[in-house]
Amino acid sequence: MTEPKNTYEASLGKKVRTTIGEVTIPSSPKVEHTCSRCGKRITDPKSIELGMGPTCRRRTMWLKGKTLEEHYASITLEEVPEDYIRLSALIEAANKIGISSHRILQACGGDRALRNPEHPFFQVYYRKNRRYVSKKALEHLQKIQ
């Protein structure tokens, strides 16, 4: 049997000679914890206990117990009603009167529409990867400045 080279094929706690020198294998393997929602590594004790990082916990609270798929299914339209406009048109109108795109997205519940909108007229709906809002949102632009 050949000696392991640049690997840790030896027993835990045992010294191993590799091409880069002699190394000691740790006596216990390092346990890495990952977020159950996104799969990223988590190190905070509270996050490890809950099995989820702080960002995913916050997003889960916004979704009120729904999964992300359920949330998007609830705001996806089969057909766009006549009294709806593209979100980009609302942003363009807002920019013309001095309201930033960022402020419009805040009013709509964030870029991904995960939070509640500031007003029902700013509720975002999806149709084939495009975002839509009620035309009545144009009338309420001054109120969100």
Image: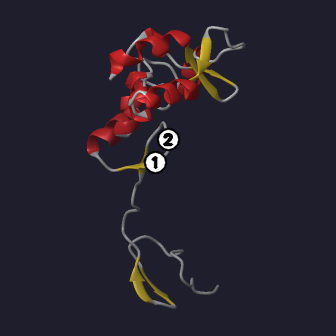
From what the image shows, is residue 67 above or below residue 11?
above
Q: Which residue is mark 1?
A: 40
Q: Residue at x 37, y 38 (%)?
A: 55
Q: Is residue 110 visible?
A: no
Q: Quadrant of residue 139?
A: top left
Image coordinates of residue 81 in percent, x first then y, are: 67, 9
Tell me the SS state at disc 2: loop
Query: Circle 2 is placed at which residue position?
Result: 38
| Residue type, mark 1 in image | Lys
The residue closer to the viewer here, 61 or 80, is 80
SS class, disc 1: loop
**Near-viewer residue (86 or 51):** 86
Residue nearest the observer in this picture, 84 or 131: 84
Q: CA distance from mark 2 to mark 1?
A: 6 Å
Residue 127 located left or right of residue 125: right
Residue 69: give x, y in percent of width and height: 59, 25
Q: Are marks 2 and 1 in contact (CB under 8 Å)?
A: yes
Residue 100 disc label: none
Q: How many marks?
A: 2
In the rendered image, the quadrant that contains the C terminus is top left
Residue at x 63%, y 18% (from the top left corner): 76
Q: Nearer the viewer, residue 19 or 15?
A: 19
